Every structure is written in C-alpha cells, then in structure tokens.
Image: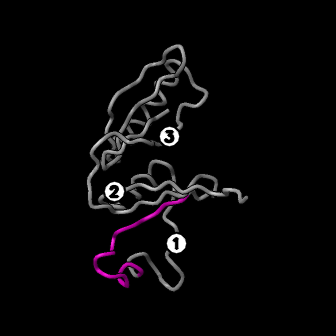
Amino acid sequence: MSQVRQVQVTFDCAEPERVARFWCAVLGYVVPPPPPGFDSWDDFESTRPVEQRGSAFACADPSGVGPRLYFQRVPEGKVVKNRLHLDVRVGTGLVGDERLAALEAECARLVALGAVRVRLLTADEENESCLVMQDVEGNEFCLD
C-alpha cells in the first residue's frame, strides 16, 4: 500500500491566473518556474493551442511545506456554497480582543487585495472567533 506524500488543492475558477495570484498574496506563496526550455510562463502559454491558453495556473509554498494550489478554468460559474474551504490561520493561540484584532488586521489586508468580508462568527463555548470571507471569484474561506 502506497503512502500519500503530498496534497494539491485544486480550485475550479473562471480566471486561473487572477485567482492564483490572489492566493499567492494571501499565503506568501510563489508562482513556480516555467517548464524546462521556457524563459517565462507567457512563452510556454504561447506554444499551447489557443483554446487552452490561460486554462490553468499554480502557486506553491516557497518553503515546500504547504500544499501546492492549482487553479483550472471551468465553463460554469460558482453557484452554491463551497463544500470545502481553506482556513487561513492568522489567530492561532490568540483569544478575545487580541484574536479579533489579528483577524480584523488580516481582513483589511485581504480586502485591499480583492477579498470580500462576509461575516464575523463570534466565539462561543466551543470555538474561537473567525471571519468568513470570499476570494476574488467568490470562493469562501475563513480567517481563523
């Protein structure tokens, strides 16, 4: 039985490069180098059939620890709530007002990048506060 050694998270979207670059900015990820033999991704894209150009993009954790994110163009738009979402862990170990301040500061940074604030879920007996947000194409994620 083989072991899973890596996980890639795939997003369906309309504009792969735009969404990938947003997530690079959110997570501090980078665009991987183009395939061997190409000086840039634009050079690589120019060799693809016209209908495939811009159909995919990726970003990766420069430390190699986090999962690779892959973005693929699909014809249909987002219709309902995600069944899976990312939690961006900015408040780990923080509670109360200190946690809220960290969430709000990161929310302001991400809104400037094109994210949308949806709602604050306040702390209860089981969970600390978190902020529900949407990326540049409306995919939900949480600041946790």
Counting residues from the start of the chain, the first of labels 2 and 3 encountered is 2
Q: What number is the disc on residue 88?
A: 3
Figure coloring? one colour
Give the alpha-carbon distance from disc 2 to disc 3, as whole Å.
19 Å
Q: Position of residue 52 (x, y in %)?
A: 33, 75
Q: Indicate the secondary structure of the residue bearing disc 2.
A: strand
Residue at 54% from the left image edge and 18% from the top image edge? 126
Asked if residue 52 lies in the magenta stretch, the reply is yes
Q: Amino acid at mark 2?
A: Cys
Residue 106 coordinates in the image, percent (x, y):
44, 37
| Marks 2, 1: nearer the viewer | 2
The segment highlighted magenta reads: 44-60
Q: Which residue is mark 1?
A: 33
Q: Nearer the viewer, residue 136 or 6?
A: 6
Q: CA distance from mark 2 to mark 1?
A: 22 Å
Question: Which residue matches tag 2?
Answer: 13
Find residue 20 and report its horizontal and vertical position in percent.
Answer: 41, 58
Q: Hey, which residue is sitting farthest front in the picture?
A: 1
At x 50%, y 32%, the residue is 144
